[in-house]
Amino acid sequence: MANDIEVCNWAPDEDADPATHTFTFGGREPVISVKPGTIIDSWSFDCFGGRVKSASDMSTQVCDPRFLNPQTGPFYVEGAEPGDTLAVHFVSIEPREAWGVSTTVPFFGALTSTPTTATLQPALLERTWIYELDLQDRLVRYAAADTKFTAALPLDPMHGTVGVAPALGEVRSSLTPGNWGGNMDTPEMRAGVTCYLGVNVEGALFSFGDGHARQGEGETCGVAVETAMDTVLILDLIKGAPTPWPRIESDDHIMTTGSTKPLEDAFRIAHSEMVHWVSDLTGQSTLDSYQFVSQTALTPVANVVDTNYTMVAKIAKDYLGNVNVMQGMHQKMRARAAQWHEYQKGK
Amino acid sequence: MANDIEVCNWAPDEDADPATHTFTFGGREPVISVKPGTIIDSWSFDCFGGRVKSASDMSTQVCDPRFLNPQTGPFYVEGAEPGDTLAVHFVSIEPREAWGVSTTVPFFGALTSTPTTATLQPALLERTWIYELDLQDRLVRYAAADTKFTAALPLDPMHGTVGVAPALGEVRSSLTPGNWGGNMDTPEMRAGVTCYLGVNVEGALFSFGDGHARQGEGETCGVAVETAMDTVLILDLIKGAPTPWPRIESDDHIMTTGSTKPLEDAFRIAHSEMVHWVSDLTGQSTLDSYQFVSQTALTPVANVVDTNYTMVAKIAKDYLGNVNVMQGMHQKMRARAAQWHEYQKGK
Amino acid sequence: MANDIEVCNWAPDEDADPATHTFTFGGREPVISVKPGTIIDSWSFDCFGGRVKSASDMSTQVCDPRFLNPQTGPFYVEGAEPGDTLAVHFVSIEPREAWGVSTTVPFFGALTSTPTTATLQPALLERTWIYELDLQDRLVRYAAADTKFTAALPLDPMHGTVGVAPALGEVRSSLTPGNWGGNMDTPEMRAGVTCYLGVNVEGALFSFGDGHARQGEGETCGVAVETAMDTVLILDLIKGAPTPWPRIESDDHIMTTGSTKPLEDAFRIAHSEMVHWVSDLTGQSTLDSYQFVSQTALTPVANVVDTNYTMVAKIAKDYLGNVNVMQGMHQKMRARAAQWHEYQKGK
Amino acid sequence: MANDIEVCNWAPDEDADPATHTFTFGGREPVISVKPGTIIDSWSFDCFGGRVKSASDMSTQVCDPRFLNPQTGPFYVEGAEPGDTLAVHFVSIEPREAWGVSTTVPFFGALTSTPTTATLQPALLERTWIYELDLQDRLVRYAAADTKFTAALPLDPMHGTVGVAPALGEVRSSLTPGNWGGNMDTPEMRAGVTCYLGVNVEGALFSFGDGHARQGEGETCGVAVETAMDTVLILDLIKGAPTPWPRIESDDHIMTTGSTKPLEDAFRIAHSEMVHWVSDLTGQSTLDSYQFVSQTALTPVANVVDTNYTMVAKIAKDYLGNVNVMQGMHQKMRARAAQWHEYQKGK
C-alpha cells in the first residue's frame, strides 16, 4: 500500500505446540518489533485454541486449562515507554470461518456459582452450541439444542481481549481484564473504533485475541459466539500522555472502562475516568463535569463473568462541542484505515 | 372519551402540608379506588417537592429529609390480589414547567462515599444546577456553573419511581427500589412502555413520581434533571400471573429489572429473570435460554446511587419470533393510548 | 423485687393465631407501655414459631413464609423520642426447652445461590437437625445425619434479632437487619451485654426474638441452633444522644455494627462508627483514632445470609484508658441485673 | 543443631539496590534451593523497605511505588511439584528493632476511596506514626499525634505476606493476596502456626515478608505496625495433596482463607473450603459438614484494604474429635521447632 505505511504480517503458527502460544499479558518475549503507525494484518485463534469444533466437543475435555484464550502477540512497539499511550485502531475484524461456537462451562458464568462466588451446589450442565455465520447477509444463526427454536442475529464481530503488559512487573492471565486491558469482553471493541491503552513497560507489548462474532452485554454465560478472526489493526503512540484505564473512541462516542469487583466499583472507575476526561476535553470543573456526565452517560455492562468484571461509560461526542480528543488520533487512524480499504479493493 | 374507558383525575394537592403526601410504598391508605383499565390523568411533584427552584437553593437546606420524593398515589386497583400482575402503561409523560433541576447532595451519589460506603473523607461540594427545558424543540439545556460550557441534550422524559406496596407487610421509603418497583431510576421508564409489577396486597396500591426530563444510565451524581410531570397512564390487571421482579415492555424490547447490592447481584436477578421469561415465551429449555440471552441481551445500568442499585436486561422482540407477551397487554394498552391521544386532539 | 424497679411480664400468647404475632419492626401497635428502667421478664418464640419440632419437619412445609421470625413486642418506652438512644441490657437468656433446631432452607444461606445472588442451579437439599441442649453442663449436642459423627459444643445463648422501629416511616421484616437493629445475628448479643439502639419514633417500639443456643460467626447455612428463649432484659433511655447504628457494650469491649451489602460496606460502617466513637471517648482526632482502631479492632463477622449482611467491630476497653461510655449506662444496668439475680435467688 | 536438620541462612542484602529485591510472587529466579525439612533462619524488610523511619517521613515521598513490600525469597523447595502442598511452620517471628511504623497513605485503606472504589473526594491526610516496641514486656506503645493519648498494646508479631508462585504463569505483586497466599494480612500468621500453600510451579518458590508487630482485624487504615522481622521458619512438603486456598493450623484451630472481592465472596471461599476440609477430616457428608461449620466457625476478617480482601474461617480442633490433620505435619513441625528452641538456648 502507500509507501509511508508499514504492514506487519506476523501471525500465529497454527501447527505449533499450544504451549508456545501467548496466554498472558506480560511475561513473554515479543514476537516482533514494529514502528508506530504500522498496520498489523494478522489473525487470532478462538478462545479455545480451535479445539471445540462440534456440539459433542466439551471444552473441559478437549482443552488444557493452561492453554485457554491464546493471544496474537505480543508486539513490541518501538519507542513506547511507561507514561505513553498506545492507540489501537481496528480496521477490520472478520470471522475466519463460517461458524462460531459457544458453551456453558462448569462453575463459570454469571448465573452459576464459581470458584470465588463459591457455593455447595452442583454445576450446571456443560453443553456446546455451534453457530452458523452467514458472512454474506451478516447473520449469526442460533439453533436451540432441546427444541426447534432458531433465531438469526446480527453479525457484530469484536475482540474480547486487547491489552498490553501490566505495571509492577505483573504477568496476568489472558482470562483477566484490568487497567492493562486484557479480557474486557465489551461488544464496543468492534471494527472502526480506536482503543487507548496506557503503556507500562518499554515496547508496550500489545496482544489481542478472543474474537466474538457477537456477544450480549455482560456475556452472561461466560462464552460469546467464539471465532477465529482475521483482523487488521493499526498501532500508534501518543507520547507522554498516560491513560490510567483503557479508553475507546468511535466516530460518535468516547468511552471509558473499569474492570474490578464488585461491579459497582467497575462502574465507579469508568465514570470517574469519564468525569475527568470530559473535564479535560471541555474545560469544565470536576463538579460541573460530574453533573454533565450524570445526565449524558450511557452505561452498557461489558462482562460479569471474568475474574474482574468490566463496565463501560459512553458519551456522545455531539454533546461535547468541538473537542480535540487524544490529539485527533482517531481521525488520523480512520484516514489510514480508509487508505487500507482503498488499497485492498485495488488489489 | 370512549364510553368504555374510565378516566381518573385524582391529583396531589399542591397547597397541602407536605407531611400529608405519600413518601412510602405501602403503609398509606389509598387516595382513590379505580377499576382495571382506568386511565389516570394526573401529575407528580419533582423529587424535592418543588422546593429547589434556583441555583441558590440547596436541597439540604430547603428540604425536610422526611419529605423527599413524594409520590402520586397510592391508587387502589379493584380486584387486584397477591399473585396478580399490575400493568402500567405510560401514555404520556410531559414536564409541567419549562425548567428542571439537578444537584449534588453531600454523601449521596456514585462518586462519593455515602452512609453505607462509609469513609472518613469530607463531602463533595453541594451545588444546584437549573436546566432550561425547550418543550418545543425537545431539548434540555445544560449550562456549567464554573465555566461557559453549555450543551443542548435531547429531552427524554421518564419516571424514576413507579411501584406497588411490598410483600411481608413491609413499608419502604420512596427512595428505595426493590421487587415492588420503587425508585428504580431507569431511563427506560418513558412514555410508550408498559411496566409490569407483581401485586403483593389487595388493591396493589400503585404510586408513581420522581419525573426526570432526562437521565444518564446510572444516575451517577444521584440526581437527574428533576421536574414535576404531567402524566397519563393506564392501569390494568393480569389475573393469576405473578411477576417476581418489575418488567418493562416497549414496542421493540422486553426488559427485566433487578434491584439490590452489590451491582452484580442486580445483574444476576435481571438476567435470571430474563432467562426464565425467554424460556417461557419461546419454549426453550432453561439452558438454551441461558445461551440465547447471553448472546442477545443489552444491559444498561439504571442506578448505582440509591439504597439498592438497579440493573436492566433488555432483548429485542425481533429475536424472539412471534411470541405472545403478557397476554398481549402492551398492544391492548397501546391501542387504548392511541384512542386517548386521538380524543385529546379532538378536544 | 426492689421497690424502685418495675417488672413487666408481658409475654406472647402461645395459643394465638400466628397472624397476630409481630413480624416487623415498625408498623405494629405496641403490646404494652413501660417506663425507662423497667425489667422485662418474658420469652420469645424460636424463628419458626415453634413449628419445626423434629428431623422430619421441613420448614418450607410446616411454616407459612409470612410468619417467620416472630418477635416479642413491640414495647413502647415512655419518653423515648427520635434522637434518643434506647439501652437494652440482657440480664439472662436461657433456652426454654432442652432442644434446639437447625435446618437448611432452599436458596437461603451463604453457600448457596439465593433470590438475589440468583443462579440457575438447583437448591441444596432441605434438611432438619435437632440438637439436644444440656442446660446443666451447658452443652449443645450435635449429631450428624448421614454418619455417626457427634460433637458437644458450648452452650452460648444469644438473640439474633433485637431492634426498634425504623426511620422514614419504614416497616421492615424481622428477617432483615439495618440501622434499627433487627436480624443482625451476632453471637455477641448474649446475656451480660448492653445494646444501644437509636430511637426513630416516639416510644422506640422495641422488640426481640430469634434465640440461638449457639451460632457460628457468619451463620453460614442461615440457621443457628434455634430455640425459644426465656429472657430477662432491662430497657432504659439515654436522652438527647443519637446512635446512628446499633452498638454493644460488654464488661470488656465496646462494639459497633454495620448491616448492608456488600460485606465490605458493612465493615466500613462498623469501623467508621468505631473510629468516631473512640475519637469521642478518648478525645483523639479522627485521624489518630483511625490509626488506633486499625491496630486494635477485632472484627468478627455476624451474618452473611440475611437480606443485609452484618459486621461487628470490637475494641477492648482496656486499651481506651479510663473512659466514660454512654454515661455509665452499662455499669448501671449491670448493677440492676445483679439486684435481679439476687432477688431471684431469694425467691 | 541436630544432624538431620538443615539450616539455611540466606538473607536479603540490606545494602543492595532495592530494584534487585523481590516484589512479586512468581517471575523471579530462586535465591537458593533448599531440601524439604530445612529450617530457614532469615529476616525480612518492613513493607517500606526500611525507608520510613520517623514521623516526618511520608511514604509517598521516601518510597518508590515499584519497590513496596519487598519479600525474602523466593526459596526453591526441592521436589515440590504442582499438586503438592508446601507446609510453612513459623518457629519464631521477632521484631529486628525496638520500633515499628504505621502511616496513612492517600487513597489506600478501608475508610477512604481508592483507585477502584473511585470517588471524586480529596484524599485523607498522609501521616506517619512511630511505635515504640518494648520487646521485654511484649508491648507496642502507641502515641496519638494530635493529643496526648497513649496506649500500651500487646506485642503480637506476624507476617502479612506469605506465599508461593501463582498458577497459569501469572506473576503477582506482593501487595496482592490470592490462592497463592501473598498479602493476606491476617493476624493469625504468628509464630507457632503452620501455613499450607498449594504448589503451582516446580520448586514452589516460597517468599515471605511484611512483618507486623501487631495488627487489627481488617488492617483498617491499610498499614499495620510495620517492622523488619527476624524470622525462623521450617519448609516441608506434603506430596500429592493439593491445597486450593491457603490454610493455617495452630495448636488449637484449623483455619481456611479466601481472598477476593467483594468480601462476601472471600467469606464464601473460606467457608466452602472449611466445609470440605471438615468433611474430609470427620467423614461427615457435605450437608452435615455445612451444618456443623455453621454452628462452630469463628470468622475474623483479615484485610479489607488490599487489592483482594481476605477472610479467615476458624474451627476449634476440640470440636472435631480425634482427627489427623495434614498427615500430622503441624505436630511434626512443632517438635522440630522445639528442637530448634532447645538448640538455641544451648548455644
Image (cartoon, coloured by chain):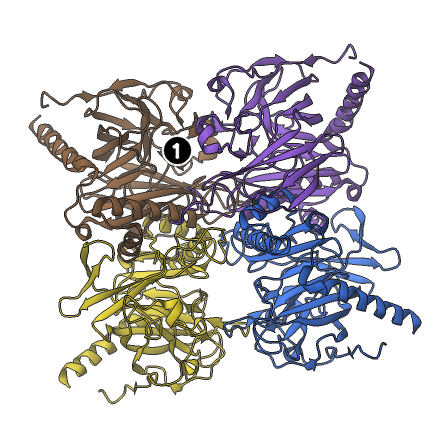
Chain colours: A yellow, B brown, C purple, D blue
Helix, strand, or loop for circle 1? loop
**What chain is tagged by disc 1?**
B
* Closer to us: B337 or A248: B337
Question: Left of C103 or right of it: where is B274?
Answer: left
Q: Which residue is label 1 attached to?
A: B52
Compared with B157, D247 (above or below) is below
- Which residue appears at 38% of the width and 22% of the height? B21
What is the residue that sits farthest to the right in this orientation? D346
Where does residue B342 sit, x and y in percent of width and height? 8, 31
Tag count: 1
Asked if residue A285 is positioned above or below residue B269 in the image, the reply reads below
Left or right: A34, with D58 as reference point: left
Q: Which residue is most to the bottom?
A: A3
Instruction: Decide if residue B128 is in sight here.
Output: no
Please, what is the three-letter code of the amino acid marked with disc 1? Val
Left or right for B17, reference C168: left
Quarter of the figure with residue C92: top right
Considering every residue shown, the one lying at the far front of the view is C148
D91 is higher (above) or lower (below) than B279: below
Q: Quadrant of residue B259?
A: top left
- Residue B173 in view (yes/no): yes
Q: Nearer the viewer, residue D53 or D36?
A: D36
Residue D225: horizontal and vertical position, in percent? 73, 58
Q: Quadrant of residue A53?
A: bottom left
Quadrant the N terminus of chain A occupies = bottom left
Residue at the top extreme? C3
